[in-house]
């Protein structure tokens, strides 16, 4: 796993794993939006498969990221690379972690609701409740993505 810590492909001093995770985080809302568009087109089976794939891949990327950060020491070591105010960075990081944690819980609930309840509820009731859960979940995914990319910029560019 030493390859993770070689220079990344983005024009910064970030290790490879940070670049990889940042790119995935940046495109995550676009991937989810594409999966949602499939549901709007009535391609429910494709929507389900895409959402499940994106969800699992997202969780694997979080694990990959956490492993990389732990091997580097911890996130405090990573934040030291920034020229920005450390207090601001810690507050922003705490906000990002809070949003990401809540979003992961909401996304888990939305995915499992979709997998389990679609056969148990009448179609109209299922769609109504699933969309009601999915809208704030998508907002959380987007906010997690934006704050994650901003953290990368704060640490390695600003």
Image (cartoon, helix red, strand yellow):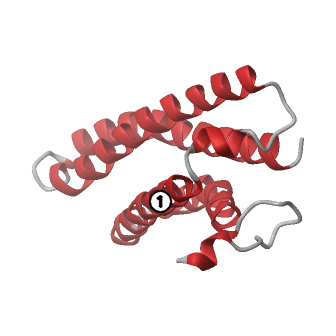
Residue 120 drawn at (x, y percent): 10, 50
Relative to 41, 3 lies left or right: right
- SS at mark 1 in the image: helix
The answer to whether 150 is drawn above or below residue 33 in the figure is above
Q: Is residue 41 in view?
A: no
Relative to 78, 123 lies left or right: left
Foreground of the two, 81 or 150? 81
Residue 19 drawn at (x, y percent): 71, 64
Foreground of the two, 52 or 95? 95
Query: Residue at the location (68% across, 55% down)?
Result: 26
Q: Quadrant of residue 34?
A: bottom right
The answer to whether 77 is drawn above or below residue 70 in the figure is above
Total tally of numbered discs in the picture: 1
Relative to 68, 125 lies left or right: left
Residue 158 drawn at (x, y percent): 89, 41
According to the image, label 1 marks what residue? 67
Relative to 11, 153 lies left or right: left
The answer to whether 79 is drawn above or below residue 58 in the figure is above
Query: Residue at the location (49% across, 38% down)?
Result: 100
Specify few, some or many for label 1: CA neighbours under 10 Å numbering under 14, 14-19, or 20 or more: some
Residue 129 drawn at (x, y percent): 29, 36
Query: Residue at the location (64% across, 22% down)?
Result: 91
Q: Is residue 115 in view?
A: yes
Query: Residue at the location (23% across, 47% down)?
Result: 113
Q: Which residue appears farthest toward the left when viewing the image?
A: 120
């Amino acid at each position: 796993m030493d390859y993770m810590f070689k220079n990344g492909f983005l024009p910064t001093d970030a290790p490879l794993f940070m670049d990889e995770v940042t790119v995935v985080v940046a495109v995550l809302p676009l991937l989810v939006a594409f999966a949602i568009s499939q549901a709007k087109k009535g391609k429910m089976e494709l929507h389900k498969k895409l959402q499940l794939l994106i969800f699992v891949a997202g969780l694997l990327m979080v694990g990959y990221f956490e492993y990389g950060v732990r091997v580097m020491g911890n996130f405090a070591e990573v934040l030291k690379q920034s020229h920005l105010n450390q207090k601001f960075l810690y507050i922003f990081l705490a906000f990002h972690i809070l949003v990401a944690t809540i979003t992961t819980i909401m996304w888990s609930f939305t995915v499992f609701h979709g997998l389990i309840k679609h056969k148990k509820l009448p179609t109209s009731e299922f769609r109504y409740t699933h969309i009601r859960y999915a809208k704030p979940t998508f907002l959380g995914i987007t906010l997690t993505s934006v704050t994650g990319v901003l953290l990368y910029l704060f640490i390695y560019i600003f």
